[in-house]
Image: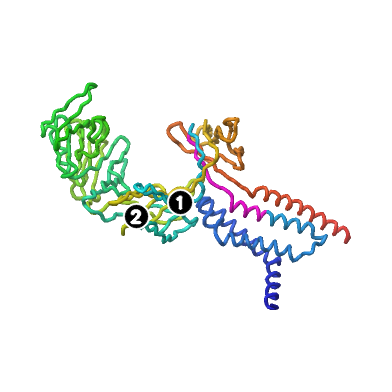
Amino acid sequence: MNFIKKYYKKLEKTVSSLKFAVVIISLLALASVYGTFAESYHGTEYASRVIYKSWWFMAIQFFMFLSILVSTIVRLPPKKRLYGFYTIHAGLIIIFIGSVVTYINGVDGSIELLPNKPTNKIRLNEDVLKIQFEKQKKALTYNLPQTGSETKLDSDYLGIKLKRYLPFSKTKLSWEKSNPEDGSSGKYLLYNENFDETLILSLNPVSDYKSLEKLGLLNVHYMPEHLYDCFLKDSKSGYLFWNLKDNSCFSAEEKKLKVQMTDNQTKFIQFKEDGRMLRFFPDFSPIALKDDLTKDDTVPYRAFSRSLFKNKPHLFIFGDRVTFYRKGLSKWSGRAFKEDKAISLPWMNFKIIKEKYTQNEYPIQTPFFTKPTQINNELIDGNVRAIELEFNGESFWVRSDAPLSITNTKETINFVITQKAINLPYEITLKNFVMKMDPGTTKPASYESFVSLLDGRNTNGASKHHVYMNNPLKYDDFTFYQSSYFEIDKDSYGSVFSVNLDPGRPIKYFGCILLIFGSIWHYIIRRKKKKAHV
């Protein structure tokens, strides 16, 4: 018992000492400086995760509180000469309590406003993974850790293994093994004397890369290899058909199919297959249409109209061969890639080289962890969240900028990384967004939002508010600050408000008042004491 009492007294003396307070204050100052630089270079979110919400920063603040509390207790019972000291320390303790209340019950997030579309959803600064089972109509939500570095998850959801989480990442190109029947992929270099562009194209449904690239006026289409010969067939109508089951292909002339016209002069072709009459409008859709003009996906045939691709530059790539329309010759031409030799194209002296063509691999963007990089308060790198998961023995990546969908024989499962959200009991609508530019530039000088707020609990109807820098909207204990904007289309913008609920604010304000009052009181007492000595 005496040992415990002796140990407690020693601990009490250490924690209440000036030396301990100086050490803790120095550590807090260094951490704050580190946080300021981290926030400047890597962004607010990174600084929050790595520093301000880290266990060690919380520990520093706790020991700061402990130092203040114990140094106050050891100076009890109250002495008149220390009344200012007690008031100052009481203010600091109350501020700490208010901060804890805010940390536990506060809300910090954002709300995106589209023009004339009411919304009540606040997105919090907390990431979640949503897993949706389509057939079962069941959804799961997994809260992701608020970490600043790569983290192992080791969680299992109905056979779905969550392996690791990257809170900040960028992607690099990698090639994964695949079955030839899943579709081929290729990498090509398109260039002329003033321009070059690497094209990565794929028919594999799992690939992050698609079969169409738009480069200004030029459209590049990646097509199944077996359609190359069919594409170059003589066809006055320009209508081609292929069977998805056996990869056979034919022109309308080969099957002696007649091009017919509807009452409004729309071309269509129809033919019988297994007792069914199939009707196609190739100039509008490659898929057969039912009698009610809805698409019939059960028909294995697809129609293609070459005439749609004559007036503008279109390049069709069939793995190791290409086709394009030559206006000067009024004909379609085909070329095969040769080793390290470019194919000349009929537009702006463009040439194209095949760098890779494979039926056994597909390209994906593989995430890897990186510290985010910020320039002019905008993240330019590392702003993608990513989770590696395993399903049926295969590994997949779901990214915040690319939701994942996995289909097996039983179920389709959708994965989305998003932010946790809460709903307000009222709606905010953006009526007008005004942005002013710096003279002679396209750089925004200021932006402001005119909004209406409709609260069903209020019988007075919608209220109007003008929100801009240093003039937030305050309602129902929430504060909405004008923080940024986003472009919807030309001359049309949406607005972003940062949202804050600080239930500990009155407590912290009261603590600040005590802090100021105590400082003045302490100064007056010390001044009187000096005069008395004189």
Secondary structure under tag 2 reads: strand
Instruction: Identify the amino acid type marked 2.
Output: Phe
Secondary structure at badge 1 equals: strand
Along the horizontal axis of the image, is 165 left or right of 38?
A: left
Q: Is residue 433 visible?
A: yes
Q: 270 or 532: nearer the eye? A: 270
Q: Which residue is mark 2?
A: 396
The answer to whether residue 10 is above or below residue 131 is: below
Q: Which residues are magenta?
A: 95-115
Q: Nearer the viewer, residue 85 or 145?
A: 145
Q: Residue at x 51, y 51 (%)?
A: 45
Q: Where residue 36 sits in the image (x, y, percent)? A: 57, 53
Q: Residue furthest front?
A: 136
Question: Does residue 380 belong to the magenta stretch?
Answer: no
Q: Give the residue at the far top of this rendering.
A: 263
Q: Is residue 188 left or right of residue 85?
A: left
Q: Quadrant of the N terminus?
A: bottom right
Give the answer, above or below, for where 196 lies relative to 261: below
Q: Is residue 99 magenta?
A: yes
- Is residue 329 visible in this depiction of the protein? no
Residue 128, label in figure: 1
**At 70% from the left edge and 52% from the top edge, which residue is drawn?**
511
